[in-house]
Amino acid sequence: MSVQILKLLLLITALLVTRSATIQAARPNILFAIADDWSYGHAGAYGCGWVETPAFDQIAREGLLFENAFTPNAKCAPSRAIILTGRNSWELEQAANHICNFPPKFVSFMEALGNHGYRVGYTGKGWGPGIANDVDGKRRDITGKNYSKRKATPPAQGISANNYSENFADFLLESNGKEPWCFWYGTTEPHRGYEYGVGVRKGGKTLGMIDRVPAYWSDNETIRNDMLDYGYEVEHYDRHLGRILQHLEKSGQLENTLIVATSDHGMPFPRVKGQAYYDSNHIPLAVRWPQGIKKPGRKVTDYVAFNDLAPTFLDVAGMDSESAGMQPSSGRSLRSIFESGVDGRTHADWNHVLIGKERHDIGRPHDWGYPIRGIIHEQLLYLQNYEVDRWPAGNPETGYLNCDASPTKTDILNLRRSGEDPAFWNLCFGKRSPVEFYDLAQDPDCVNNLAESSEFREEREVLSRRMVEKLKEQGDPRMFGKGKIFDDYIYTSEGTRNFYERYMKGEKVKAGWVSPSDFEPAPVE
């Protein structure tokens, strides 16, 4: 080998090593802050006057606020599986369902980052409920190492004793400052249950602060109190988020940390959580990253979804799905939005998201789900309900199990039982038509179904074709006549498996997320 060639090879090697070291050094820390059941709009940054969120507002003010961010599946386990893998729920086999087995072949971005030089950890709620084991049956650290030693006296009943921010501080203290880290901060708030009246009694709120009650609930004192109690728990999430920001600032790591603040899906109220309407899937999202966001303080109107997050995290870490050892993602990195400096829409064709669901909570015969697919395109929502003979929120005689117990739920059930006003029950719990179509600009609450309207016939047909085309591209089994597979996947909680059959035979099966009064004494026709 000539001296010149040897020198050239050494130079190339040096450049590659330098570039690798530069990329390694430039990789940001990542803080993923996710609330449990927090709806879009309920933050100061979105103009809400009855929920105070100074930390979220700071992230939005110093970064980006997303107006059209969605989870493709509005239930805890499938929504979080989408975040972790960058794949829609219909691409995740068993992990499309709630309380399921998470297939080992679907590597999470947390695992991938941990395998490529990042320290990874979490506190609070990571992925779940369900079982995530590897091929040998060993429990996976799907969101990293657990930090949960620090406890604090909860400010109200129903709030966790987890001192989230101090547990993050413990994680930070273990960092050596040389390797980047990724931390999952996941509260169990504002998941139910709540201390009734705490929003007024301890939060200093008044019922009149709520500017509007959704059209699918009655507007009364009980429901307004329930909403304020929910808001009080959102503020608990934000309070700890603010303390985490302070820890980052004190440690000198705030400027090199990509912070994503969001929620897994909409609020735990009838017709929101566990369904597929605008309020179900529309989620808050703010992102802060001083070293990677051009022109902070922007509002982004591109349509983005949770399957875009994993590709984004991998991108800023210098990887893609293949190099990270993950399955291919149907999402897109948001980095182009970060770097665009554009207010409003960066990509003209980022104008829609796909949504859907399979089995969430049980309570129907055979533990069957309620399958839906849909598309939100600009201000139009198209939904296809595939099993309209089933009850959307679970069978009435088994307590409408896909809707958590709450004062709002009780109010709606009693309005039907008394004969006073069954309209809200029909909207929240009644059976549905095969197709639903809503003009979100005029009807964001989705109470006026335009599926039979001649005015929107062309739009319905276009969105239906586009939805099916996209779902086929992603290999959705339901688009190929194989949707039954989602009902056949095992429901992993033995305590409530086959709930309907066991309950109807007289067994006292415990479902802790509903109240005894939620159960109808007989089937509803």
Image (cartoon, grey):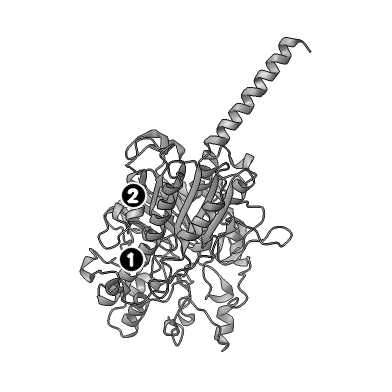
The vertical placement of 318 against 306, above or below, is above
* Mark with earlier residue (1, 2): 2
Residue at the limit of the structure toward the left, as seen here: 208
Amino acid type of the residue that numbered disc 1 sits on in the rendered structure: Gly
Q: Residue at x 25, y 72 (%)?
A: 219
Helix, strand or loop status at disc 2 = helix
Provide residue 357's location: percent of width, then percent of height.
50, 61
Is residue 328 something one can see in this rendering?
yes
Q: Is residue 277 visible?
A: no
Looking at the rendered image, the quarter that the C terminus falls into is: bottom left
Q: Which residue is mark 1?
A: 231
Q: Which sits in the foreground, 297 or 507? A: 297
In space, the residues marked 1 and 2 are separated at their CA atoms by: 18 Å
User: Looking at the image, which is closer to me, 480 or 312?
Assistant: 312
Residue nearest the observer in this picture, 229 or 352: 229
Q: Residue at x 43, y 37 (%)?
A: 291
* Residue behind mark 2: 58
**In the image, residue 281 lies at what x, y percent?**
41, 57
Check disc 1 and report its element: helix, strand or loop.
helix
Query: What amino acid type is highlighted by mark number 2?
Result: Gln
Query: Is 165 drawn above or below residue 341 in the view shown?
Result: below
- Please tell me whether residue 87 is drawn above or below residue 210 in the rendered image: above
> Is 406 situated left or right of 6 in this image?
left
Q: Quadrant of residue 384?
A: bottom left
* Picture quadrant of residue 416: bottom left
**Image-quadrant location for residue 295:** top left
30 left or right of 505 in image? left
- Counting from the top left corner in percent of width and height, residue 48 is at 27, 58
